[in-house]
Image (tube, helix red, strand yellow):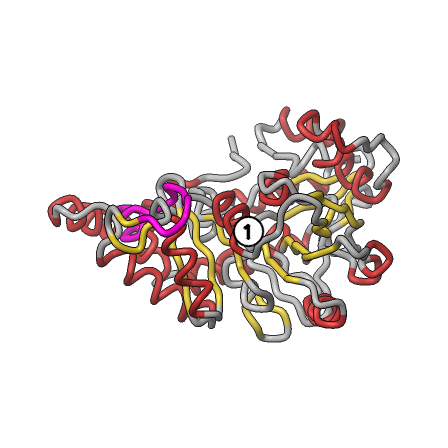
Amino acid sequence: MKIMPNRMDRGFYMYQKEFEDKALDVLRSGWYILGKEVSDFEEEFAAYTGANYCVGLASGLDALWIAFRLLKIGTGDEVIVQGNTYIASVMGITINNATPIFVEPDEHFGMDPGKIEALITEKTKAVLVTHLYGMASRMDEIVTICKKHNLRLVEDCAQSHGARYNGQMTGTFGDVGCFSFYPSKNLGAFGDAGAVVVNDEALAKEFKIFRNYGSEKRYYNKVVGANSRLDELQAGLLRVRLTHMDELIEERRKIATRYAAELNSPLIQLPTLALGATSVWHQYVIRCEERDRLIEYLNEREIGTIIHYPIPPHLAEAYQYLGHEPGFLPITEHLAQTVLSIPMYNGMTEEEQTYVIEAINGFG
């Protein structure tokens, strides 16, 4: 049996007719940019998250860098960000010429609130939290710190659509919640797509102007903006998937629950959630000190895996100019050497789950 680490085709076939009908509706409409599908999705996704406003954008990275741009964070400013995030989080900061200040994660892969305050300086202007692998971070402590020090709070929710902390949806704790709808996400489009959610009406209006060349009225440009528009086709397809989010999340939770109950190899460590946090299990990430041997073992059994992520941003070639050497973030770097994402996707059969579980339990 051959099992891929992720399968997006299964998610399509589950609702094939709905997706195809919606695509044809959009194609036949004759309106493909900033139309009713986008505005309806923005309204529906805002309601889903509990935010006041949603603004559709072209990608999750655009959501991040535009967020910091509109929060007026730039040259000379510092943003605290966890070291074990995907590099796009850091790019959202550095595209604006601000400086990322890396903090170590806690045992749940999220930002460790206990390590934030020691990094705050007079240059610190914001904190960027990543809800990694679909697991909500410990937001109560982080919100308290940001309020105490008058810092902006941005959430990278690229992997956490639907995850909650103490009952509140990720993306709604701070100034801006940034979402990616890349096809592999739980709420995935069929191409690049993204959005922000905000509670401030004026800020939502700024995002809408900035995404469309800085124009509120056609050919009248208020600011130098960007071309970062969620298109009608992707918005329409996202609306279809959004109606099924609860069942899609529940399916992944059942797979994760089975993994937690039945995986028992003494050589692997299972993920855990912070108290009050939920996960939508965008990835199911185990840890193994003998990861390379485990990958080879699973490859021999045609079970695919992915490392999220093998190179921490502070050690990436792109950020050599920051001057960080190996050993700078020992927890982050150890995670990069031991984490492994095993198969997790909607439409994964019980037979496939059993095969993965039995294979991993046989690793020794």
Q: Residue at x 30, y 56 (%)?
A: 240
**At which x and y percent is residue 65?**
54, 46
**At which x and y percent is residue 279?**
60, 60
Establish if 156 lies above or below 323. below
Disc 1, SS = loop
Type of amino acid under label 1: Gln
Quarter occupied by the C terminus: top right
Q: Quadrant of residue 116?
A: bottom right
Relative side of 361 to 243, left or right:
right
Mark 1 = which residue?
A: 159
Relative side of 157 to 122, left or right:
left
Q: From where the camera sits, is residue 149 visible? A: yes
Q: From where the camera sits, is residue 297 visible? A: no
Establish if 154 lies above or below 173. above
Establish if 249 lies above or below 90. below
Q: Residue at x 70, y 32 (%)?
A: 310
Q: How many marks?
A: 1
**At which x and y percent is residue 139?**
68, 67
Q: Residue at x 84, y 30 (%)?
A: 325
**At which x and y percent is residue 94?**
63, 40
Closer-to-camera residue (68/128): 68
**Which residues make up the magenta segment?**
221-237
